[in-house]
Amino acid sequence: MSFGFFGIQFGWNLQLSNMSAIYEYLGAKPDQLPILWLAAPLTGLIVQPIIGHMSDRTWGAWAAAVPTSSPAPSSARWL
């Protein structure tokens, strides 16, 4: 599993190392590159809590009936 994650990180870093050239190819000026590099982390910092808050409010009435932290007793198994 560690080797798989290493490969994913290696590929991601290769892509990120070329992002400035990709931004320039798409028409960004060199003085706009720093703000483009900050756009994704700042967007995640703002959007992720909003999406998390929205998803926390999607539970139905059956959510309390399902145990999440302890295994079900043998009489409650659904097999």
Image: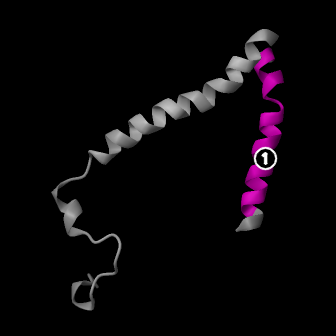
Label 1 environment density (alpha carbons within 10 Å; few <14, some 14–19, many ≥20):
few
Residue 29 seen anywhere in this rendered image of the structure: no
Residue bearing mark 1? 11
To which quarter of the image does residue 78 belong?
A: bottom left
Q: Horizontally, is 76 left or right of 37 in the view?
A: left
Q: Position of residue 7 (x, y in %)?
A: 78, 56
In the image, the segment drawn in magenta is 4-24
Judged from the image, the secondary structure of the residue bearing numbered disc 1 is helix
Name the residue type under label 1: Gly
| Residue toward you, 64 or 8 | 64
Q: Position of residue 46 (x, y in %)?
A: 48, 30
Counting every numbered tag in the picture gives: 1
Q: Horizontally, is 63 left or right of 48 in the view?
A: left
To which quarter of the image does residue 74 belong?
A: bottom left
Q: Residue furthest left?
A: 61
To which quarter of the image does residue 67 belong?
A: bottom left
Look at the image and tell me in which quarter the C terminus lies. Answer: bottom left
Look at the image and tell me in which quarter the N terminus lies. Answer: bottom right
Q: Position of residue 66 (x, y in %)?
A: 25, 69
| Residue toward you, 49 or 18 | 49
Q: Residue at x 82, y 41 (%)?
A: 14
Prevailing SS of the magenta stretch: helix
